[in-house]
Amino acid sequence: MHKKNIAVLMGGYSSEVDISLLSGKTVMKHLDPDKYEPYAIEVLREGWVCKLADGTAIPVNKDDFTVMIEDTVISFHCVFNTIHGTPGEDGLIQAYLDLVEVPQTTCGFYQAALTFNKRDCISVLRNFGVKTAVNYFVNKGDVVDVDVIIEKVGLPCFVKANRAGSSFGVSKVYTKKEFPAALEKSFKEDDEAIIESFLDGTEVSVGVINLDGEVVALPVTEIVSENDFFDYDAKYLGKSQEITPARITKEQTKAVQEMAIKVYKVLKLKGITRAEYIFHNGEPHFLEVNTTPGLSPASIIPQQAKVAGMTLKQLFTGVIETAIS
């Protein structure tokens, strides 16, 4: 059987580069060796390279997304995209791969751009009856009337960078005087901010995948942060407990899984996604969706797959075959 060449894309240009490299390595390790020939492609500001096992870095030809290895031009049957943040989660890579006609495992460029923009994504989903926090939008350079914001969203509230991942540029604000510093922190990541009401309740994360043409929700993970909220330290430095399956009722599990599948379908997503919800007043409220979620051993999707009785090899094979077909 002829093996398919799979480019595992990792790296990126954002604060999440190191996490993406870990995700990429996980995919490399778990791809089915009988079916696939994986190539590690690092997309970094200083250049795009194919990293060989011995550490040799070979430049990627961006004209057609090929690599020349020992006088042989390697082209790819599929790209497995594990870049978190720009350019892999905001639509840039998706649009480029569309142009060079290489299939890839994540959603299309428009869906990626839409979901990466928290404000736009929430605005679309609200029209489909998806509940969210109360929010207020601010752009860098706007004259900000903090009293008006507090009147709308209340305290405490969250101030977030609109287009950033891994909780970079997020602050929980308790008092009026904390606003300027919180906005400044968000504007370091993006020139748009979103201010959201605090939703008190159980936070959960739901992976959704398209396998063999069927959209399936994975077991639900409950997130219990030791910190004030699920921030970078909680996500990556072990300052949180992730409990799968979540300690919620069967009805709540069903409600949030149905909501997650609805969001996936409404937004026309593809591949592996993961969305966060908070049960506020007993109902799931949508926070955000990740279209290239973390796949490193510490990440939530691998934990959910395990509880679902699915190996990473099965999961990744399903995603690649769906992308190619």
Image: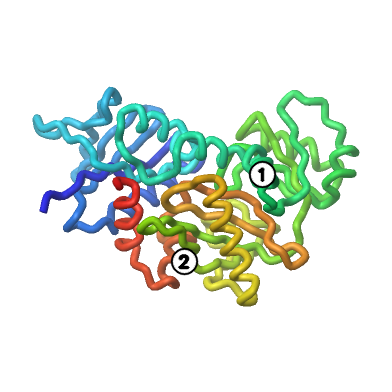
For image coordinates 35% across by 53% down, the residue present is 319
Is residue 6 or residue 101 the one in the foreground? 101
- Residue 284, percent across and down? 68, 61
For image coordinates 42% across by 42% down, the residue present is 83
Identified by mark 1, the residue type is: Ile
- Residue 49, percent across and down? 28, 33
Q: Secondary structure at mark 2?
A: helix
Tell whether 70 sits left or right of 218: left
Numbered label attached to residue 269: none
Q: Do we see residue 14 in this rendering?
A: no
For image coordinates 33% across by 38% down, the residue present is 42
For image coordinates 84% across by 51% down, the residue present is 155
Task: Using the image, determine if residue 220 lies above or below residue 127.
Answer: below
Q: Residues within 10 Å of mark 2 (few under 14, many from 20)?
A: many
Identify the residue position indicated by label 1 in the image: 122
- Residue 129, percent across and down? 69, 52
Identify the residue position indicated by label 2 in the image: 304
Identified by mark 2, the residue type is: Gln
Q: Quadrant of residue 255?
A: bottom right
Is residue 32 or residue 260 the one in the foreground? 260
Tell whether 300 sits left or right of 171: left
Q: Do we see residue 164 in this rendering?
A: yes
* In this rendering, the label closer to the viewer, 2 or 1: 1
Task: Using the image, determine if residue 211 lies above or below residue 162.
Answer: below
Task: Using the image, determine if residue 218 lies above or below residue 287.
Answer: below
Tell whether 133 sits left or right of 82: right
